Image: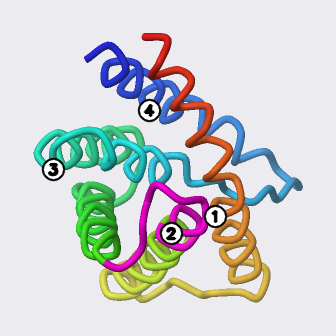
């Protein structure tokens, strides 16, 4: 239970600090999707209900602190839970290859759904080459860092 509380606090801190780090003018940094990694990790050790509550709650926090449509991120993170649940039937989330594949594909799904939903609700969305490049770089970076963060989370979980 202590680790679950730590994950909630980590997610809240990342929500509050994310805007500061990723909105610096003139600097484009690939967005590491920490929530997807945490959702994948919590999927290993907690019930589907707890993972869904975490994903929905973090999505609502993002929606509250952003200026976008309410419920968008909550829906996206619940879709990630469903994707990881379905994908874990075919790939082992406890192996590094399974972690990289499932988390990368979940981030890809999230980005595609995000852009499609924005295009559906707003006619002024234009996808530039740099935007697509940063999305692909984000998917790759998130996937590659996943086994490292899973290892760190395992160590933190064993301590708490």
Is 35 left or right of 130, judged from the image as shown?
A: left
Kindly check if marks 4 and 3 are in contact, taking CB atoms under 8 A apart as contact.
no
Mark 4 — residue? 11
Q: Which quadrant is home to the C terminus?
A: top left
State the residue position of label 1. Answer: 143
Give how far apart the Cα atoms at labels 3 and 1 are: 22 Å
In the rendered image, residue 48, in percent from the top left (x then y), is placed at 15, 50
- Where does label 3 land, which residue? 48
Q: Position of residue 78 (x, y in %)?
A: 24, 60
Q: Earlier in the sequence, mark 3 or mark 1?
A: 3
Q: Residue at x 48, y 35 (%)?
A: 15
Q: Which mark is residue 107?
A: 2
- SS at circle 1: helix
Q: Earlier in the sequence, mark 1 or mark 2?
A: 2
Whether 93 is among the magenta residues is yes
Residue at 30%, 49% (x, y): give it.
Answer: 43
**Position of residue 95 in the picture relative to residue 135 (left or right):** left
Q: Disc 4 on helix, strand or loop?
A: helix
């Amino acid at each position: 239970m202590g680790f679950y509380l730590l994950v909630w606090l980590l997610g809240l801190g990342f929500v509050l600090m994310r805007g500061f780090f990723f909105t610096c003018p003139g600097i484009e940094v690939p967005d590491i999707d920490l929530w997807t990694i945490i959702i994948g990790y919590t999927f290993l050790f907690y019930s589907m209900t707890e993972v869904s509550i975490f994903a929905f709650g973090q999505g609502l926090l993002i929606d509250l602190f952003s200026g976008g449509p309410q419920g968008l991120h909550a829906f996206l993170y619940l879709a990630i839970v469903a994707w990881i649940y379905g994908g874990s039937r075919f790939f082992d989330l406890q192996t590094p290859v399974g972690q990289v594949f499932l988390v990368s594909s979940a981030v890809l799904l999230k980005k595609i759904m995000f852009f499609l939903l924005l295009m559906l609700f707003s006619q002024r969305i234009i996808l530039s080459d740099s935007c697509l490049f940063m999305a692909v770089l984000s998917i790759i970076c998130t996937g590659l860092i996943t086994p490292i963060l899973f290892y760190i989370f395992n160590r933190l979980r064993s301590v708490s």
